Amino acid sequence: MRKLFTLIAFLLPIAGILAQGEDVIKKLDEKSDFYGSIAKQIWSNPELGYLETESSVLLQKTLTDAGFKVTAGVADIPTAFVAEFGSGAPVIGIMAEFDALPGVSQDAVPFRSAVVEGGSGHACGHHLFGTASVAAGITVKEWMQSNGVKGTIRVYGTPAEEGGGGKVYMARAGLMDDVDAMLHWHPGSRNNAGANSSLANISTKFRFYGEASHAAAAPDRGKSALDGVEAMNFMVNLLREHVPQETRMHYVITRGGEAPNVVPAFAESYHYVRHPDAMVVKEIFKKLVDAAEGAAQGTQTRMEYEVINGVYNLLPNETLARVMQKNLEKVGGVVYDDEERKFAEEIFKTFPAGVKASPEDAAKIDPFMVNEKGSGGSTDVGDVSWLVPTAGLGTATWVPGTSAHTWQAVAAGGTSIGQKGMMVAAKTLTLTAMDIFQAPEIAQKAKEELSKRQGEGFEYEALVGDRKAPLDYRK
């Protein structure tokens, strides 16, 4: 009989925890349309990095109305904010993004149709990202209040992820120093929560200054800034043969002159250099600067450069990621209705030959994986992950097979498909935060793993140096 009572005493708290989980999932289901309307407002008014005034205000108001204390304009960034509820440890943070991308305006239809020709669009789904993180923060706060849970929940409004590095400046300002666990997510075409890395990245604008002159009547009096840009880019392309094979280098010429008959007095190119290791990126970046200096000398122009952004590779945290995976599997993926299936079938017709996907893929959960060598893109979450134990997930907010930064991503992100994937993320983030609050040893183990992965003697040094946030990089 004593064993029976002992077993009951052990099982009752577990049953209570399971019931709480089901309760918060139900609450989020009930508020799906409420949060969907917030995401659609941001989607309908896509704002670029550091210019997300209305998007930031909307998310801040939502949090304030829910009882959070919101501090805006943190880290000298007008659209950045920190929303907080509770006090003391553990401190759990959830990051929220909300910036759009230029040149990918698209209506919520399965064929190419820009809302504003050449306009911006949420081709990376950050309207969903920010909203789901806010939804999770509010739901965790309500659960804490209802159950007398001690600790602090924070939602970090992090602007300009797309090349502006908002999180870098927030982390450098010490806004995350006392966080025990940081959670995030990202829209995508699959559901996964593995412990994955990314590519470190330094992005830079190289500016060349020459002397204008008539290109036909007096070319000898001119010094072409465009020649400087082109000479640099030629050398950078030659450099590709002599860098580690995991390196990625790409650029655009943002200014090349105004008229063919005027020798350009100013020209500019915008370069990215990426690698799975931040220290390797620093070394390759030095070679780009050498190429730029050589180009300036060879063309008798003057060169200046500005580091626009610099981010570390993501540091995986398997401890937190496994908790996230467990909750993602509990929540499940995205199940399409008939209308969503028709939308997906039309999107499939726009994919290149060889892309294999089906509507059923949106309901699948990828198996857990650990990938310590970065690939794909870069994110300013990387810097946070080197300072605070961090875990994230991706959910199927887009039609399976969709690539990020495409019109197809914008289109699905404005439909119920995007909303469903967003709510999968909100539920998973909520349950994961609840787990950490109820078992603080998770955060302690995660911190021990972080320390081990950092390596002995690690000291964080932002790749952007001491520069201020480039608030005008999208202007």
Image (spheres, rainbow, N blue to C red):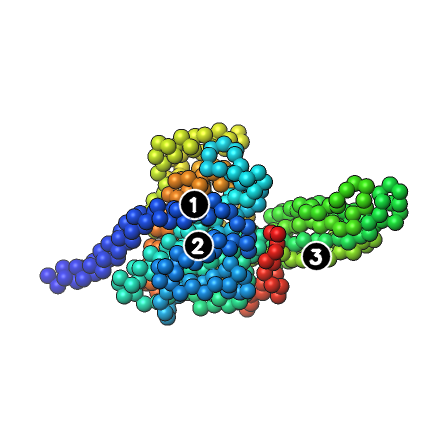
Measured as percent of width and height from the top left, residue 198 is found at: 53, 51
Mark nearer the N terminus (2 vs 3): 2
**Mark carried by residue 58:** 2
Mark nearer the N terminus (1 vs 2): 1
Measured as percent of width and height from the top left, residue 415 is found at: 42, 39
Q: Which residue is drawn at 29% across and 48% down?
A: 30
Q: Residue at x 51, y 47 (%)?
A: 46
Disc 1 residue type (three-letter): Lys
Label 3 residue SS: strand
Measured as percent of width and height from the top left, residue 308 is found at: 63, 56
**What whole-number distance in Å separates the C-alpha atoms at marks 1 and 2?**
12 Å
Q: Residue at x 87, y 41 (%)?
A: 216
Disc 3 residue type (three-letter): Tyr
**What whole-number distance in Å separates the C-alpha atoms at marks 2 and 3?**
36 Å
Point out the residue furthest to the bottom here.
88
Label 2 residue SS: helix
Which residue does the numbered mark 3 point to in the structure image? Answer: 305
Q: Residue at x 76, y 51 (%)?
A: 266
**What whole-number distance in Å separates the C-alpha atoms at marks 1 and 3?**
38 Å
